[in-house]
Image: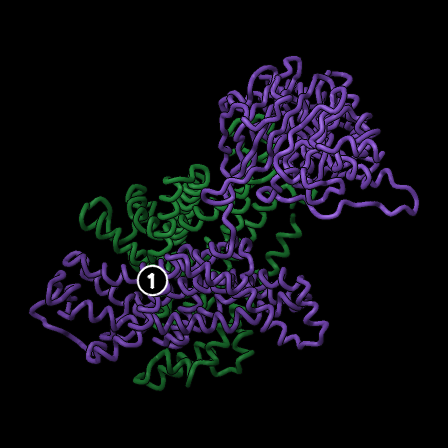
C-alpha cells in the first residue's frame, strides 16, 4: 500500500499517554495483540534462523529443472518456481532481507524521531518551531523517488535505501512524540522533578519517555509497515537484491514474469507480505485501543418504554392534567460497562405549567441535565429512561416513537444550551442554520424563512439582523450567540423552553440582559421555561418555583419565596448558605463539606446522609420518600421539624 | 488568503533547494567517483571523461550545484546519461500518463473512501465492521502485488481488460480508459482505506459534537444532520490528509507503472535508478517535489475556503 502512505493524524491526536504497568497488562489481555506479537516474533526468528538452516538456498541458481512451476505438492509444499527451486525454502530464506531492511529503517526512525520529538515537545520555543518546520518540509518529499535517486548512486545498497527511507519518514514519529510530550510536560510532577534539581536529561528519559511509550509503539508499528512496503516494493523492482538471492518482493516479480503459465507463484510471497503488514497494523491498532477509551456515541440513544416505578413516592403518583409538562417517577440509567447499569436519576417527579418558570437547581453531577435531556429524548451515550413517564400535553413522551418525538423537538419543546457558540455548526452561516430550523417547523419557502429569521432576530433584540444572519458562529460574541440560540429556540413557537445553564458562560452584565429577554419573551407568548442552573441569583431573578436535585433525586420542591424564606431540606439550606450572592463583606462563605457522590455510589438511605449536619441513624436505614411539607411543597427529609426550629 | 498561498510557495522554494542540494551532497558522498560508478569499471577513459564533464564533476561542488540550479531554474535539467535525451523532454512526454493515473486514483479514493467511511460511522454494527475489515485489508496489500493479482483475474482469466500497456486518449478514449482501470484500482486501494478510516473517525467525532446534539434538539431531519451538519465538518479533516494521499500516490506510481508497463514518470524513475542515470532521476525528484508543493498549496487554499474560521475576512 505504498499508495496510501498516510499517517492518520488522528493516531497522534487521540492517543492518551500510557500509564505503563496497567497499560501493558491491558494490552496483553487483548488476544489480538498477542497473536500479532507472536507472529512478528516468528518472522524475525525465521529471518535469523532460516538462512542458517538452509545454507544453500540463497546461492541456488536452479533447482530441479524437470520440475519447474509446479503447484503445491507433498514434496514441495508451496510448489516450485520457474527454475525448479522450492518456493517454501526461498520464502523462508527470503525473510531475512525483509527483516533486515525493516530493522534498518526502524532503527533510523527511532533514533531520529524519538529524541527530536522529545526535545521539541519538552523545550518548545524555537527548537520546536525548527523541528516542526523541518518535519513539514519532509512531508512534501516524494520519499520513494528520493530512495530511487539514492539507489541510482549506490546501486543495490539496501542499507543506503532503507536508511534514507528512515530519515524521510522519521518526522512522522517526531510529530507524534512531540504531541504526546506536550500534555505530559504540563503535569505537576514534571515541574516538581525539575524544581528538585534533577537534570533535564534525567527527567526526560525517566519521567517523560515512559509516559509517551504507548504512542511511540503505535506510530512505530505503522511506520514499520510502511518500511516493509518500501522494502518489498524495491525488491520487486529488482533494485535491492542481486539475482539468485531470494526476497519476498523479488519472488513476486519472478511470479509476475510467468503469470500466464503459473499464476500461483505470486501468492506465497504476496500473502507473506500482506500478513506481516497486517500484523504490524493490528498491533498498532490494539495498542491504540488499549490507550484510548473507545466511546462512540450512537446517533440515536436507546429509549425505553417505562411505566411508573413501584418505588415511586406515593403522594407523587397522581398526574396533574392541567400541567403542560408532568414528569412522574423518572428513572434514568447509563450503561458503564457490559452488564453494568448505573442509575443517574431516580424517582424524579415534577410539573411545569404554562407561562411559568421552574428552576432545576443543584451541584454538578446531580442529574439536572440528564433530566432535561430525557424530556427531549436526547440522553447522551448509553443513557435511557428506565422507568417513569414524561407527560407533555397529555402524551407520554417516553412511549412515543422516534418520528413522533422528532416533530416535538424544536417545535413544541425547544432547547437553549450552556455554550451557545459551540451549539452552532461552525461551517455554516447562522442565518442559514436558523432558516433550516424555521423551514422544518413552518414549511415556509426559502425566501419567507429568511425574512422570518430576521424577524426572530429582532424579537431577541439583535442589532442589525441582516449583518448577524450572514455571520459564522465564531464571529459572534457570547451574548450575541446566546440571543441567536434563543431565536433558534423560538423558531418553532415552543410551549416549553428548556434552558440548560443559559447564562453560565456569559459576563454578568450580559447575563442580566439575557434573563430580562427570557422574561420579556415569556410575557409575550405564555411559554413555560424549565431553567437548569446552579446559580441561586438566576433562580431568584426569574423563577416562580424551584426544584432542588441532589445525587439524582429531588430533595425539595417549593414556590421560590417560600423556599428562600424557609428551606425544608438540609441540602437546600446548605446550598443557600453557600450562595455567594448572599454573602456580605468579610464574611467567610460557608461551603458544604465533601462532594456529591457519583451515580453508582449513592448511600443506602438519604443520598445526602454523609454530608448532612442533621443526620441521625434513621436517615441511613433505607430510602427516604418525598413528603408534603406545606402548600405546594415537598421535601425528602425526615427531620424537617428540626430544620424549622433551627431557623 | 494570498499571503498564505505565498508563504506556502516560499516554503516550497526552500524545499526545492533542500531536495536539489541533498541530491548533490549524495553525489559527493558517492564512494569513489560518481562518473565511474555510472559508466562502470570497464568503460574507456574517454567515455569516463565525457560523463565526468557532462556531470560537471571536474568543477568544485558548490560551483556544480550553482550551475545545475541556474540551468534548472530555466527548465533545463541536463540530459540523460544513457539516452542523451534532454531530461525535461523525457519527463514532459510521460507527464500525461502519470497525471491520468493520479487524477483517476484521487477520484476513486475520494468517492469510495468517503462513502465507506460515512457508511461505517453511521451504520456501525456488522456493516461497519465489514468496512473496517476492508480498510485493514486494503492497507495490508501492497500496490505492486495487488496489481499482479488484478492482472491475473481481469486480464489473464477473464480477458476483460488489457494486462499491460497504455493507450493515449487522443488515439482512443475507450482504449485509454480500459488501459487505466486496473492501474487505478491497484494504486487507489491503499488511499481508499486511509480515507475511509479518516472519514469514519471524523464523522464519529462530528456526530458526538455539541452542534449535532443541538441540531437534533431543533428537530432537523436525520439526513440533514448527517450530511449538511456532520459531514460538512468531517470533510474538513478529510481534506487535511489529501496532501499525504497525493504524496503516497506519487510514490505508488513507481510500482504501479512498472507492473502495468505504463510509460509514466514513476516508470521513468525506476529505469533511471536501474541505469544509474543520475541527471534523469534528479529531474524526476525535482518535478515530483514541485508537484507536491503546488498541490499542497492548493489543498491549503481549499481548506481555508471550506473552513470559515480560517477565512481572512
Task: State the residue in front, A319 or A638.
Answer: A638
**Residue drawn 66% across and 62% down?**
A187
- Farthest residue in the right direction? A585
- Farthest residue in the left direction? A66
Task: State the residue in front, B2 or A514.
Answer: A514
Q: Which residue is mark 1?
A: A276
The reply to whether residue B93 is in sight is no
Q: Is residue B215 left or right of residue B279?
A: right
Query: What percent of the width, then of the height, locates residue A436?
Result: 60, 25
The reply to whether residue B2 is in sight is yes
Task: State the residue in front, B302 or A535.
Answer: A535
**Residue drawn 18% across and 48% down?**
B157
Query: What percent of the width, then of the height, locates residue A616?
Result: 71, 40
**Residue drawn 65% across and 75% down?**
A200
Q: Quadrant of the N terminus of chain A?
A: bottom left
Q: Residues within 10 Å of mark 1 (few under 14, many from 20)?
A: some
Task: State the residue in front, A509 or B238.
Answer: A509
Query: What percent of the width, then of the height, locates residue A501?
Result: 71, 35
Q: Is residue A148 left or right of residue A497?
A: left
Q: Which chain is green?
A: B
Q: Is residue A83 left or right of residue B305?
A: left
For residue A342, what is the image quadrant? top right
Q: Quadrant of the C terminus of chain A?
A: top right
B281 to A359, vertically: above or below: below
Query: What percent of the width, then of the height, locates residue B49?
Result: 40, 83
**Residue drawn 35% across and 86% down?**
B45
Identify the hue of chain A: purple
Amino acid at each position: 500500500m505504498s499508495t496510501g502512505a498516510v499517517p492518520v493524524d488522528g493516531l497522534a491526536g487521540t492517543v492518551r499517554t500510557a500509564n505503563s504497568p496497567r497499560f501493558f497488562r491491558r494490552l496483553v489481555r487483548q488476544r489480538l495483540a498477542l497473536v500479532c506479537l507472536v507472529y512478528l516474533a516468528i518472522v524475525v526468528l525465521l529471518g535469523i534462523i532460516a538462512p542458517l538452516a538452509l545454507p544453500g538456498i540463497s546461492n541456488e541458481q536452479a533447482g530441479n529443472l524437470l520440475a519447474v512451476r509446479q503447484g503445491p505438492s507433498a514434496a514441495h509444499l508451496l510448489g516450485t518456481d520457474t527454475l525448479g527451486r522450492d518456493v517454501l525454502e526461498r520464502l523462508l530464506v527470503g525473510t531475512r532481507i525483509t527483516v533486515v531492511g525493516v530493522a534498518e529503517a526502524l532503527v533510523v526512525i527511532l533514533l531520529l524521531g524519538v529524541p527530536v520529538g522529545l526535545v521539541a515537545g519538552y523545550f518548545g520555543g524555537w527548537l520546536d518551531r525548527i523541528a516542526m518546520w523541518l518535519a513539514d518540509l519532509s512531508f512534501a518529499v516524494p520519499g520513494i523517488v528520493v530512495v530511487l535517486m539514492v539507489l541510482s548512486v549506490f546501486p543495490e545498497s539496501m542499507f543506503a535505501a532503507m536508511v534514507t527511507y528512515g530519515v524521510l519518514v522519521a518526522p512522522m514519529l517526531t510529530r507524534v512524540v512531540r504531541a504526546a510530550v506536550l500534555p505530559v510536560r504540563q503535569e505537576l510532577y514534571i515541574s516538581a522533578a525539575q524544581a528538585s534539581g534533577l537534570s533535564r536529561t534525567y527527567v526526560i528519559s525517566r519521567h517523560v519517555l515512559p509516559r509517551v511509550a504507548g504512542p511511540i509503539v503505535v506510530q512505530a508499528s505503522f511506520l514499520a509497515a510502511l518500511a516493509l512496503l518500501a522494502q518489498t516494493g524495491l525488491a520487486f523492482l529488482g533494485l535491492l537484491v542481486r539475482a539468485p538471492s531470494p526476497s519476498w518482493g523479488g519472488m513476486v516479480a519472478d511470479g509476475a514474469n510467468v503469470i500466464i503459465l503459473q499464476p500461483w507463484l505470486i501468492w506465497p510471497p504476496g500473502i507473506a507480505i500482506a500478513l506481516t503488514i497486517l500484523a504490524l497494523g493490528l498491533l498498532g491498532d490494539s495498542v491504540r485501543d488499549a490507550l484510548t477509551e473507545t466511546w462512540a456515541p450512537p446517533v440515536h440513544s436507546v429509549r425505553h418504554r417505562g411505566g411508573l416505578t413501584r418505588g415511586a413516592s406515593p403522594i407523587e403518583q397522581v398526574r396533574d392534567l392541567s400541567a403542560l409538562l408532568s414528569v412522574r417517577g423518572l428513572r434514568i440509567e447509563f450503561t458503564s460497562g457490559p452488564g453494568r447499569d448505573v442509575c443517574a436519576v431516580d424517582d424524579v417527579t415534577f410539573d411545569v405549567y404554562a407561562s411559568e418558570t421552574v428552576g432545576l437547581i443543584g451541584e454538578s453531577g446531580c442529574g439536572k441535565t440528564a433530566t432535561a435531556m430525557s424530556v427531549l429524548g436526547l440522553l447522551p451515550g448509553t443513557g435511557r429512561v428506565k422507568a417513569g413517564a414524561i407527560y407533555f400535553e397529555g402524551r407520554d413522551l417516553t412511549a412515543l416513537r422516534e418520528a413522533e418525538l422528532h416533530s416535538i423537538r424544536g417545535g413544541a419543546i425547544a432547547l437553549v444550551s450552556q455554550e451557545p457558540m459551540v451549539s452552532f455548526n461552525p461551517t455554516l452561516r447562522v442565518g442559514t442554520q436558523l432558516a433550516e430550523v424555521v423551514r422544518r417547523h413552518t414549511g415556509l419557502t426559502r425566501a419567507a424563512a429568511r425574512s422570518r429569521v430576521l424577524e426572530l432576530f429582532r424579537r431577541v433584540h439583535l442589532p442589525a439582523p441582516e449583518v448577524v444572519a450572514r455571520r459564522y458562529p465564531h464571529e459572534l460574541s457570547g451574548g450575541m450567540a446566546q440571543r441567536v440560540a434563543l431565536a433558534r429556540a423560538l423558531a418553532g413557537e415552543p410551549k416549553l423552553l428548556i434552558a440548560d445553564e443559559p447564562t453560565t458562560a456569559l459576563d454578568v452584565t450580559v447575563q442580566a440582559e439575557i434573563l430580562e429577554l427570557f422574561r420579556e419573551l415569556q410575557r409575550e407568548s405564555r411559554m413555560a421555561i424549565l431553567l437548569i442552573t446552579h446559580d441561586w441569583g438566576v433562580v431568584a431573578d426569574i423563577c416562580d418555583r424551584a426544584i432542588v436535585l441532589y445525587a439524582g433525586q429531588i430533595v425539595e420542591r417549593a414556590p421560590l419565596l417560600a423556599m428562600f424564606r424557609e428551606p425544608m431540606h438540609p441540602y437546600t439550606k446548605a446550598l443557600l448558605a453557600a450562595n455567594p450572592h448572599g454573602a456580605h463583606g468579610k464574611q467567610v462563605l460557608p461551603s458544604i463539606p465533601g462532594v456529591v457522590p457519583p451515580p453508582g455510589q449513592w448511600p443506602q438511605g438519604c443520598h445526602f446522609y454523609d454530608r448532612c449536619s442533621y443526620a441521625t441513624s434513621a436517615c441511613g436505614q433505607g430510602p427516604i420518600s418525598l413528603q408534603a411539607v406545606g402548600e405546594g411543597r415537598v421535601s425528602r427529609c425526615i427531620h424537617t421539624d428540626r430544620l424549622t426550629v433551627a431557623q | 488568503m494570498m499571503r498564505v498561498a505565498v508563504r506556502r510557495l516560499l516554503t516550497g522554494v526552500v524545499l526545492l533547494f533542500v531536495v536539489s542540494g541533498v541530491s548533490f551532497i549524495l553525489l559527493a558522498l558517492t564512494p569513489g567517483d560518481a562518473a565511474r560508478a555510472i559508466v562502470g569499471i570497464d568503460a574507456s577513459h574517454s567515455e569516463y571523461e565525457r560523463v565526468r564533464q557532462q556531470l560537471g564533476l571536474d568543477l568544485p561542488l558548490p560551483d556544480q550545484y550553482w550551475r545545475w540550479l541556474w540551468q534548472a531554474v530555466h527548465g533545463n535539467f541536463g540530459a540523460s546519461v544513457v539516452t542523451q535525451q534532454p531530461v525535461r523532454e523525457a519527463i514532459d512526454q510521460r507527464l500525461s500518463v502519470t497525471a491520468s493515473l493520479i487524477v483517476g486514483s484521487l477520484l476513486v479514493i475520494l468517492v469510495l473512501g468517503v462513502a465507506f467511511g460515512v457508511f461505517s460511522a453511521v451504520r456501525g454494527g456488522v456493516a461497519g465492521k465489514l468496512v473496517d475489515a476492508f480498510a485493514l485489508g486494503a492497507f495490508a496489500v501492497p500496490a505492486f502485488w495487488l496489481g499482479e493479482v488484478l492482472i491475473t483475474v481481469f486480464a489473464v482469466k477473464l480477458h476483460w481488460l488489457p494486462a499491460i500497456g497504455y493507450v493515449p486518449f487522443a488515439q482512443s478514449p475507450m482504449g485509454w480508459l480500459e488501459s487505466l482501470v486496473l492501474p487505478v484500482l491497484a494504486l487507489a486501494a491503499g488511499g481508499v482505506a486511509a480515507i475511509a478510516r479518516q472519514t469514519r473517525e471524523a464523522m464519529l467525532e462530528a456526530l458526538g459534537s455539541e452542534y449535532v446534539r443541538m441540531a437534533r434538539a431543533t428537530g432537523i431531519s436525520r439526513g440533514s444532520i448527517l450530511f449538511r451538519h456532520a459531514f460538512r465538518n468531517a470533510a474538513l479533516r478529510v481534506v487535511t490528509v489529501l496532501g499525504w494521499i497525493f504524496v503516497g500516490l506519487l510514490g505508488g506510481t513507481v510500482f504501479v507503472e512498472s507492473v502495468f508497463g505504463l510509460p509514466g514518470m514513476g516508470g521513468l524513475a525506476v529505469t533511471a535508478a536501474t541505469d544509474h542515470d543520475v541527471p534523469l532521476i534528479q529531474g524526476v525528484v525535482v518535478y515530483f517535489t514541485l508537484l507536491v508543493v503546488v498541490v499542497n498549496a492548493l489543498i491549503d487554499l481549499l481548506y481555508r475556503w471550506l473552513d470559515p474560521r480560517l477565512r481572512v475576512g
